[in-house]
Image (tube, rainbow, N blue to C red):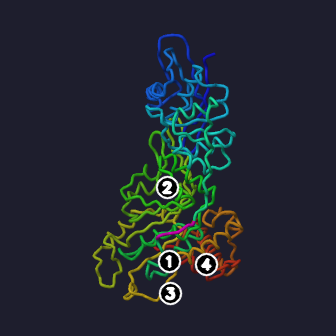
Amino acid sequence: MPLAIVHSRASSGIDAPPVAVEVHISNGLPSLSIVGLPEAAVKESKDRVRSALLNTDFEFPTRRITINLAPADLPKKEGGRFDLPIALGILAASRQIPHNILADYEFAGELALSGKLRPISGMLPFALATKKINRSLIIPIYNADEASLVGDISILPAKHLLEVCSHLKGNQELAKHQLLPTKFPDISELDLADVRGQHHAKRALEIAAAGQHGLLMVGPPGTGKTMLASRLSGILPQMTDDESLKTAAIHSICGKVFNIKEWRKRPFRAPHHTASSIALVGGGNPPKPGEISLAHNGVLFLDELPEFNRQVLEVLREPLESGEVIISRASYQSLFPAQFQLIAAMNPCPCGYLGDSRGRCRCTVKQIQQYRAKISGPLLDRIDMHVEVPSLPKGALSETNSQNIETTSQVRSRVIAARDKQLARQNKSNSVLFSKEVEKICRLTTNNKNLLEAATEKLGLSARAYHRILKIARTISDLADSKDIRSEHLTEALSYRGFI
């Protein structure tokens, strides 16, 4: 029977659902039709496949060819990833290559008109799904490094359609791709020692890194807010293998060029304040991840926070709580992880010089209120820490005493030690503790409870802010290698709330 089935996968968010490419050749007028909800790029594959087969001296059957991408109800089968499976299905159905061994493999790759294989996007989710069913993977050689990160999977990379056919015929087997090492030294080019002064802000940055807390820095222009934020990645611990795979999978479906040097390095995303809500949270048709998902397991830095459109900022509220974002469309939904650490910076007033000793601020009270009102109270309430970054005192920039300046490596060692304590105690960072876990892990003495309740009432803090203060105090005690939260830890945690 002139029927062949080739296994491949589609792309749906960060998942790769299986797709069976069924090829049937029958008598009738020469034609080729593709069914099963193919997108435009898939429909065009018939022309690429025809040219690729003819240019590699294969016979293109002059009969009726029907190609079904099953399951038929799986929408958004897109891209050139089905070129190779379709070509192999036609060759197998016309008995130009063996069809009985196709079930052992999964195939993906775009074909050039000459038969060369071109890379596809979303290779990492593809490889992760293939590993679960223990099949070998035949892909373009340009995707092999990315797929090899999965580990314990047979990857057979190829440069040309002829190489794949030769392997399936048993003439010359494809060589298995060697797995790449997954551990690299985490060397940051940006050193925290470059930031002079601002010891209070540096301390806040260290606490934020240790507990994965959100941080809002408020201060005049040129005081080091952006410099501090850009150096946060250097003091964060390396990602685990599981975190690295999930983060790389998100970048893979966006078509980002894979760079092994970035493996296990936490992403740092800094979108411009003109970014739309779709650019920030994701969207489109089919949905693609936004900046908050590209910052998964890393840092999202929003500079000039009030300059962002208020509606854009409001879409951050749910992902900050849930750690994920769901993009809904009429016929389907896509879920993208978004467990990011929010770091934001802003000026204290429209001109930026509120409280300046030289009296440069000319903003009225109403203008200041309108400026700060661009950021809603619910969003501010979800940012764990608020810290002031004041103008530098005279002589701070010319400070030469290196003994008082800590480097990134020194701070990072303390951050890693504190994060290790959290992982050993609750298997996650302090910032994502649930309410019941906070009650158990962040216990206070009677005196400290009274102190916190009095501060909550005086500052008008919400129940959410109450629990976030406890989490920050727990992180401070972890940095101090203290088993319990002491009064000085709680007092310091309270100093990082309620600037606005």
Q: Are marks 4 and 3 in contact (CB under 8 Å)?
A: no
Q: Callout 1, which amino acid?
A: Lys
Instruction: Check disc 2 and report the residue beneath it.
Output: 292
Where does label 4 land, which residue? 490
As for residue 187 lying within the magenta part, the answer is yes
Q: Name the kind of residue labelled 4 in the image.
A: Leu
Disc 2 is placed on an element classified as helix
Q: Earlier in the sequence, mark 1 or mark 3?
A: 1
Real-space CA distance between mark 4 and mark 3, rounded to the nearest whole angstrom: 26 Å
Could you give the CA–CA distance between mark 1 and mark 4, rounded to whole angstroms?
A: 18 Å
Compared with 127, 269 (above or below) is: below
Which portion, as a residue range, is magenta?
185-189
Mark 1 or mark 4, earlier in chain:
1
Q: For the N terminus, give its image quadrant.
A: top right
Callout 2 amino acid? Ile
User: Nearer the observer, disc 2 or disc 3?
Assistant: 3
Crowding at mark 4 (Cα within 10 Å: few <14, some 14-19, many 20+): many
Mark drawn on residue 202: 1
Q: Where is residue 43 in the image (x, y as percent from the top left)?
A: 46, 28
Label 3: which residue?
404
Disc 4 and disc 2 in contact, CB within 8 angstroms: no
**Label for residue 85?**
none
Image quadrant for the C terminus? Answer: bottom left
* 254 displayed left or right of 474: left
At 69% from the left and 40% from the top, the residue drawn is: 134
